[in-house]
Amino acid sequence: MSQPGVVFPRTGPGIMSDDGDALTFCSTCAFSQACLSEGMDKSALMDLHVLVEHVGPLHPGEHVFREGDPFTAIAAVRAGTVKTYQIDRNGHEQVLGFHLPGEVIGLNAIHGDRYPCNAVALDTVMLCRFSFPKIATLAQRLPNLQQHLFRLMSRDIGVASLFARDNSADERMAAFLIGLSRRLAARGFSPRRFQLTMSRTDIANYLRQAPETVSRVLRRFEKDGLLHIKQRDVEILDLPRLEELALAVLRD
């Protein structure tokens, strides 16, 4: 049964300034390229009653949605990091993923009309909320947007299968770090310097490893000159070597 949570609360005025305006999308918008390729800007979306709601700030530990909540919307992360997870029959948490600015949460709820997992803020999170019935109608009119939604869903499926393989602890950690690096770089952030907003325990859960294994691998990477870590701040010192180690998992 669904527990009460923070389900897409609306923002008040002046909480956070938008880096877009009345006609242009935010720089991290998950749908801007698909819409713009069809010649549609924000004003065109408003004419079609496809309104984008800015949501937040959500603080660490606040839920975007909980497993079993009715599915009404998908959301693009605008700032911060969102963790998705499930609780198994034994009451143990299983981390499904970490979602960064420009990435979408809620797509895995399309089939069942209810969210199949929980989504929680790991730091201060801002979201853009899209009514799914309205964006689905819009996608029927905009082939590029429909294809974009399919690509997003395909990506989620592909990422979910990466760490199901029989790879070493070093390969898994390298793939995790390189994955973060590439996702951040694609959105204009530094590929070499970033913060691990998730805990070591969460990383270990996601990689299907023990927390002490994650800590040991990170210490070894630092000793070998691959990276430098200070608390949650990471600096990748040898990107080619880390990418080579990650290839066994990423296979690109």
Image (cartoon, grey):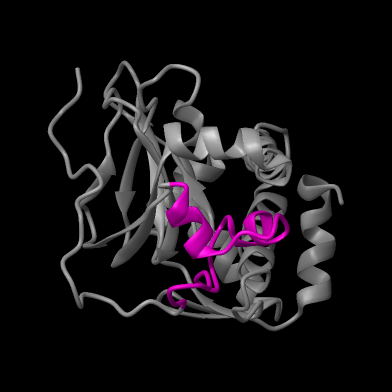
Q: Which image quadrant: the N terminus?
A: top left
Magenta stretch contains residue 40: yes
Where is residue 158 shown, x and y percent of the image? 70, 37
Where is residue 188 shown, x and y percent of the image? 63, 78
Q: Residue at x 29, y 25 (%)?
A: 70
Q: Residue at x 72, y 40 (%)?
A: 143
Question: Magenta region, mostly helix, strand or loop?
Answer: loop
**Taking 104 as reference, is 127 left or right?**
left
135 and 112: which is toward the camera: 135
Give the magenta part as a residue range: 20-48
Residue at the extreme front of the image, as rendered? 47
Q: Residue at x 34, y 32 (%)?
A: 72
**Taking 174 as reference, is 92 left or right?**
left
Q: Residue at x 69, y 63 (%)?
A: 178
Q: Is residue 110 above or below residue 107?
A: above
Indicate the quadrant where residue 243 lies: bottom right
Where is residue 111 shown, x and y percent of the image? 50, 19
Can residue 203 be seen here? The reply is: no
Magenta stretch contains residue 157: no
